[in-house]
Amino acid sequence: MRCPECKSSKIKVLEKRNAEGEDVIRRRRECGACDFRFTTYERIEVASLVVLKKDGKKESFSREKLKYGIEKALEKRPISDAQIEDFVSIIERDLKARGLTEIKSKEVGDVVLAGLKKLDDVAYVRFASVYKSFETIDSFKKELEKIS
């Protein structure tokens, strides 16, 4: 660690505490050479997750893209923004907890579908209709029968 002001390495920690829940450590520091004070944040860096698409392409996991798809399925449903945020966090945690660096898009979709099935039937059917690319009305009916 170097002082951002004078670049000295004589740094001491004045105060340490958790910030943003328990996920981040905030440290208040002071330079021993120039007395400049500054704050640093320490976060756990998780290996990035890569999604393997159906066409064989690889794409970095995107929480925003996941959230967008879930929000579309839950549009005009009685689910709050906080509930959506919690749901997305649960899905993301579940995927990352698998300890994999690559995951198939089908697995991501299956996890989302399973969660939506518990959260909201209408959102489940909306998401399934896009995710499973129903070709006929019969395939759509079969999916509806699964949740009835």
Image: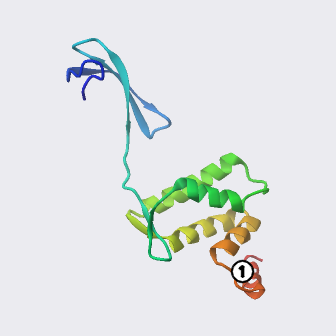
Residue 98, quarter of picture: bottom left
Q: Which residue is drawn at 72% across and 69% down?
A: 126
Image quadrant holding the C terminus, namely bottom right
Residue identifier under label 1: 143
Give x and y (percent) for residue 56: 44, 76
Quick check: 27 left or right of 33?
Answer: right
Residue at 79% x, 56% y is: 76
Q: Is residue 26 above or below residue 50?
A: above
Q: What residue type is labelled 1?
A: Glu
Q: How crowded is mark 1: few (under 14 residues within 10 Å), some or many (20 or more)?
A: some
Find residue 137 and report its horizontal and vertical position in percent. 77, 85
> Quadrant location of residue 117?
bottom right
Residue 20, position in %: x, y? 50, 35
Relative to 144, say whether 118 is above or below: above
| Nearest the eye: 34 or 29 | 34
Viewed as shown, does residue 89 lie left or right of 44? Answer: right
Q: Which residue is drawn at 49% across and 77% down?
A: 55
In the figure, is residue 109 to the left or right of 14? right
Looking at the picture, the colour scheme in use is rainbow
Q: Which residue is drawn at 68% across and 56% down?
A: 71
Image location of residue 63, percent across then percent down: 53, 54
Quarter placement of the N terminus: top left
| Relative height, residue 50 to residue 147 (above, below) | above
